[in-house]
Image (tube, rainbow, N blue to C red):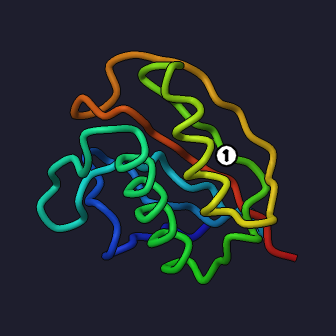
Amino acid sequence: MEFIHASKACASVGPYSHAVKAGNTYYLSGQVPFHPVSGVVVGANMAEQAAQTLTNLKAVLDEAGLKITDLVKTTVFLANWGDFEAFNEVYGNFLGDHRPARVCVETSNLAGGCLIEMDAICFVE
């Protein structure tokens, strides 16, 4: 197993790694819209917070030497299901034509009062 720390993503707020490589599979920890330097939530609405969350996810992908097309599954937690369309638009633009499997659920009390959190699984042949 290899533990991956992404210096360009927001700092871990607990005893975990940004990602863990196990064989050809990578498990990426949940990312939220924290600014990677200040740790402050970026954005007041879903579109802004989703964009920063995906920026942080991309920083983890980059550190691990992965591409967006290596994503096989994402799990998305939204604080308000009413934000689904705004999230989906940002997410679709981020992925382009790539379409990994996805779970998207409404939840409450995300870290720091965030509107979104997302984790991912990647696979490299």
Residue farthest along the left direction in this orientation = 38
Please tell me in which quadrant of the rendered image residue 72 appears: bottom right
Q: Position of residue 44 (x, y in %)?
A: 24, 40
**Does 14 sit left or right of 95 as displayed?**
left
Q: Position of residue 10 (x, y in %)?
A: 29, 60
Q: In this rendering, is residue 3 above or below 66? A: above
Q: Name the residue located 42 percent from the left edge and 36 percent from the top edge.
A: 116
The mark total stands at 1
Residue under circle 1?
74
Please tell me in which quadrant of the rendered image residue 88 appears: top right
Q: Position of residue 34 (x, y in %)?
A: 26, 52
Label 1 neighbour load within 10 Å: few <14, some 14-19, many 20+: some
The quadrant of the picture occupied by the N terminus is bottom right
Q: Position of residue 98 (x, y in %)?
A: 80, 63
Q: Name the residue located 37 percent from the left edge and 57 percent from the top edge.
A: 52
**Does 88 sit left or right of 54 as displayed?**
right
Disc 1 residue type (three-letter): Thr
The quadrant of the picture occupied by the C terminus is bottom right
Q: Name the residue located 39 percent from the left edge and 50 percent from the top edge.
A: 16
Q: Name the residue located 39 percent from the left edge and 72 percent from the top edge.
A: 6
Please tell me in which quadrant of the rendered image residue 70 appears: bottom right
